[in-house]
Amino acid sequence: MASENSILLCEKMGRVALLKLNRPEQLNALNDALMDALGEALLALDRDQDISVIVLTGSDKAFAAGADIQAMTDWTYNDVFQSSFITRNWETIRKVRKPVIAAVSGFAMGGGCELALSFDVIIASTSAKFALPEIKLAMMPGAGGTQRLPRAIGKAKAMDMCLTARTLSSEEADRYGLVSRVLSDEAFIDEVLKIATSMASFSLPALISIKESINRTWESPLSEGITFERNSLYARFASVDAHEGMHAFVEKRKPIFKNC
Ligand code: CO8
C-alpha cells in the first residue's frame, strides 16, 4: 500500500493499522496526491478483514498545516468545479465504516483541523494546536469545517475560531470538546496505539454499529436517530459476539469475539 518514501505510510499492528501523513517539509500540507492516497488507503483498510481500527497521524511538528496553499494559488472556479475538489477525494472518509482515530501532534490548521474533525475520535498530544485560519488568506474552511466545528464546540466558539483565526491549545481544544482526550507528548503515539488496540479487541460489528448510530445524531432529528439506534440495538441480538459478550460476563470469563 505504501513504501518507505511514500507520502502516506502504513503499518499494521495486530488489528490496528497506523497511517502516517508523510510530507514533513510541507508540514503535511494536504494536496490532491496525499488525499487520493489517504482515501484509497482508508478504503483498503476498511475492506481488510484483519483490521478493526485505523489510526491516522502526522509528525511531531504537524498533523497537517492545512490544504496545500501552494497548489491552490492559481486555481480558478472552473478548475475546482470541474475536478470536484474535495468532494472527489476528501469525502471518501465518510465511506469508512471502521472507527478511525486522529492522533494529532503539533499543527492541525485549516484543512488539517477539518481532516481531524472528519474522523471519529481525536486524541491530541499536549503540543497540538488547532486553528481554522483560512480567513487570513481571504479563503474559508471548505472540507466541512463550518459544519462540523460548530456541531462539535458550538456556534460561539466556532465563529470565534473561524472569524478571528485564533489558535487553540490542546488544553482549550479539550475544554471546548473539540478533542476526545489529551495525552502527554512523551510516547504519544504508543499511548494512542494502546487505546486503539483496546478498541480493536471489541467486536468489530458492534464498533461499526455504535459509530453509525452516533453519526446519525448529526444527520437526523432525535426521533429518527432513536429509531435508528433501536434497530441497530435489535440487530445486536442477531450477533454471535453479543451473546458471547453477555454469556462471558455472566460466567465471569473473558469473551472471545469472532467479529460476527
Ligand atoms: N500549504 C503549503 N505549504 C505549507 C503549508 C500549507 N498549508 N503550511 C506550511 N507550509 C510549508 C511552508 O510554506 C514552508 O515551506 P518552505 O520551507 O518551502 O518555505 C514549510 O511548510 C514550513 O512552514 P513554515 O516555515 O511556515 O513553518 P513555521 O513553523 O514557521 O509555521 C505554521 C508553521 C504556523 C503552521 C505556518 O506554516 C502556517 O501558517 N501555515 C499555513 C496554515 C494555514 O493557513 N492553513 C490553512 C490553509 S487553507 C485550508 O486549509 C483550507 C482552504 C480551503 C478549503 C480546502 C479544504 C481542504
Image (spheres, rainbow, N blue to C red):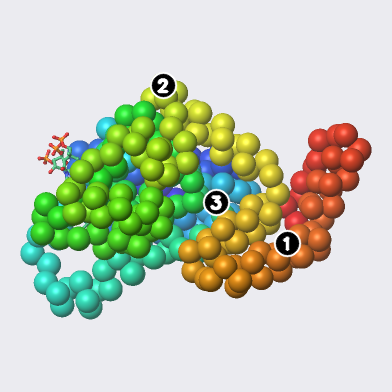
Q: Is residue 164 left or right of residue 17?
A: left
Find residue 98 and report its horizontal and vertical position in percent. Answer: 56, 54
Give the CA separation, mark 1 to mark 2: 39 Å
Residue type, mark 2 in image:
Glu
> Quick check: 217 above or below 76?
above
Q: Identify which residue is drawn at 20% across, 43% down.
A: 166
Quadrant of residue 155 within the rendered picture: bottom left
Per the image, label 1 sits on a secondary structure element best described as helix
Any part of residue 68 in sight: no
Q: Mark 3 CB in 8 Å range of ligand 1?
A: no
- Residue 99 marker: 3
Residue picked out by circle 1: 233
The residue carrying pointer 1 sits among few (fewer than 14), some (14 to 19) or many (20 or more) residues within 10 Å by Cα, namely some
Residue type, mark 3 in image:
Pro
Q: Is residue 49 left or right of residue 10?
A: right
Displayed-image quarter of ligand 1: top left
Q: Which one is in front, 142 or 63?
A: 142
Among numbered discs 3 and 1, the one appearing first in the sequence? 3
Residue picked out by circle 2: 186
Among numbered discs 3 and 2, the one appearing first in the sequence? 3
Q: Identify which residue is drawn at 50% across, 34% down.
A: 192
Give the CA separation, mark 3 to mark 2: 24 Å
Query: On the rendered image, what quadrant is the C terminus found in?
Result: bottom right
The residue carrying pointer 2 sits among few (fewer than 14), some (14 to 19) or many (20 or more) residues within 10 Å by Cα, namely few
Please say if the residues under marks 1 and 2 sit with CB atoms less than 8 Å apart.
no
